[in-house]
Structures are given as structure tokens and as C-alpha cells.
Amino acid sequence: MKSYQTIKRTTSRHTETIWLSRPEKRNAIDQAMAVELPEALDAAAADDDVSVLILRGEESTFCAGADLNWMNSSDLPEESKPEKLLPKLFKSIFYFPKPLIIVVQGTAMGGALGLIAAGDFVMATDDARFAFSEVRLGLVPATISPFVVRRIGEYKARQLMLKGSSISAKEAMQAGLADVIGPATDIEDEIKRLCQELGKNGPKAMRTCKEMLLHVAEQRLDDKLMAYTAEILEKIRSGNEAREGMRAFIEKRDAVWRQK
């Protein structure tokens, strides 16, 4: 497995965890991380042994957003500017083809909420704090806004982004930014349970399902869309994975991909 400067990758059976690993900078996203994280996501997407991905921060903080030393640089080459790299980073999270769990502890600020909003499942410790802090710095949460609006809606995004103040994990869950909150030990148990549930599913089916939903969400409800969904069903239904899954159900046994 490739080594990185700003992230770490660990695996356990069919689950991979990517750790944001700049604890001395509260895991802030700098230029290197903005390049390395999409590379690691691509590697996990291509690894057939990985069914589920977890993204979390090392030590006491999830992520303090974009590194202000990077954001404040005025002499960067075009390809290294935050406005070039950050949209690619958030898109790589949003379009990751396998189930993606985000685990939040400590603080999540600014750009960190782009990572959170682009994930599939968000679990947070009950003492975590969330903040769209950009306006407090004279900035705007521009590159994260498409993902946040999709997750929590326009008007809730307006309220949180315009205020810029910190909110609790409970408030984040009420807003739609988190799905499960609880004490740290309970969250670890919830992660295990969710990974076990996802492990019961056909890997190809989950990948196709996620791809389908991303497409459907952007389309009009018309005959073209219905034809697309019919084609997806036909392809997946006639494939080996679906045939095995249906046979296993009829025969009252586990499918071959079921993770014990």
C-alpha cells in the first residue's frame, strides 16, 4: 500500500479506513492532502477486496477545514490553488462508488463539512462541534455549498452558513448533517454494526445502486429516466451476483459474499 504524507490507510477484512493524519494541524486540508485523498479514494474504489470505506480524523479532531496558510497563499501555481483542488476533492468523496461512512469527533469546521456532506453515512460523537466558519474569516463556503445544499437543503444551509457559529452534534443531526450521534464507544459499536449490515449486501449491487441514485437525482421523471432504470434492472438481474443472491434466498442460505 502506498505511503502518504497527510493521510493513512488501514484495512480490516473488507473495510478500509482512510485517516486524515495531520493532528498537529487539527487535520486541516492542505495542498498535499487535497491531492492525496482523491488518490487514496481511487485506490480504494479499484480494490475489489474493499466493500466499505470509512473516513475519519486522527486523534481529537476530525478536520479543521482548509489550512489557512494554504488559503492565504497568493503566489501558488494555477494547478495548486485551493479553488482548483478543493472542488475535485469534494467530488471524489461525493462520487465514490462504494458505501462511505464519515466519522466525526472533536471539531469539524469549514471545508470539513464538505467532506461530511458528500458522504453516505455520518456518525458523530455527542461532544463534536460543527461550524460553517468561513464568514467569520471573510470567506465563503463556496466549494462545499453544492454538497451541503444537497444534503440539508437550501434554507437550512442559508441559516448555518450565514451565522457561521458552532453547533452541537445534536443540532447537526437535526439539521441533517449527521445521521447517528452518541458517546465515542457507542459510535464505534454503531460503525461495526453498519459495516456488518453493508457486508450482507452484494458489492456490485451496492455500487450499481449508488451510481443509479446519483444519476436519477439529477434527471426529470420522464420516459427516458424510466427506460434507464429498466435497463439497470435488466443488467443487474441477469448478472451472476443477483442470480446467486436470489438462489441463496430461495435455498435459505447465505450468499457467497456474506461477511461473517
Image (tube, rainbow, N blue to C red):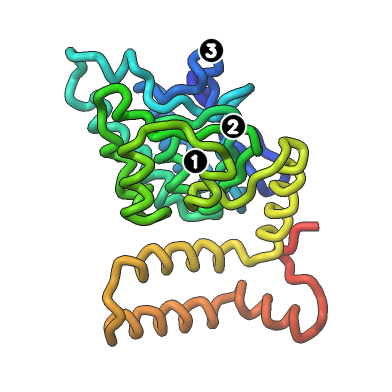
The quarter of the displayed image where residue 237 is located:
bottom right
Give the residue at mark 2. 9
Considering the image in quadrants, where does the N terminus appear?
top right
- Residue nearest the viewer, comparing 127 with 72: 127
Residue 184 locus on image (x, y percent):
72, 36
Give the residue at mark 3. 24
Dot 2: few (<14), some (14–19), or many (≥20) neighbours within 10 Å? some
Residue 126 locus on image (x, y percent):
65, 38
What is the total number of numbered labels drawn onto the structure image? 3
Residue 13 locus on image (x, y percent):
72, 45
The quarter of the displayed image where residue 222 is located:
bottom left
Query: Comparing marks 1 and 3, which lies closer to the viewer?
Result: 3
Q: In the image, 187: left or right of 166? A: right
Label for residue 25? Answer: none
Dot 1: few (<14), some (14–19), or many (≥20) neighbours within 10 Å? some
Dot 3: few (<14), some (14–19), or many (≥20) neighbours within 10 Å? few
> Mark 3–mark 2 contact, CB under 8 Å?
no
Report the Cα–Cα distance between label 2 and label 1: 10 Å
Look at the numbered disc 2 and give the secondary structure of its residue. Answer: strand
Give the residue at mark 1. 43
Three-letter code for the amino acid on which mark 3 is drawn: Glu
Task: Using the rendered image of the protein, determine whether residue 245 is visible from the camera's viewpoint.
Answer: yes
Look at the numbered disc 1 and give the secondary structure of its residue. Answer: helix
Query: Comparing marks 2 and 1, which lies closer to the viewer?
Result: 2
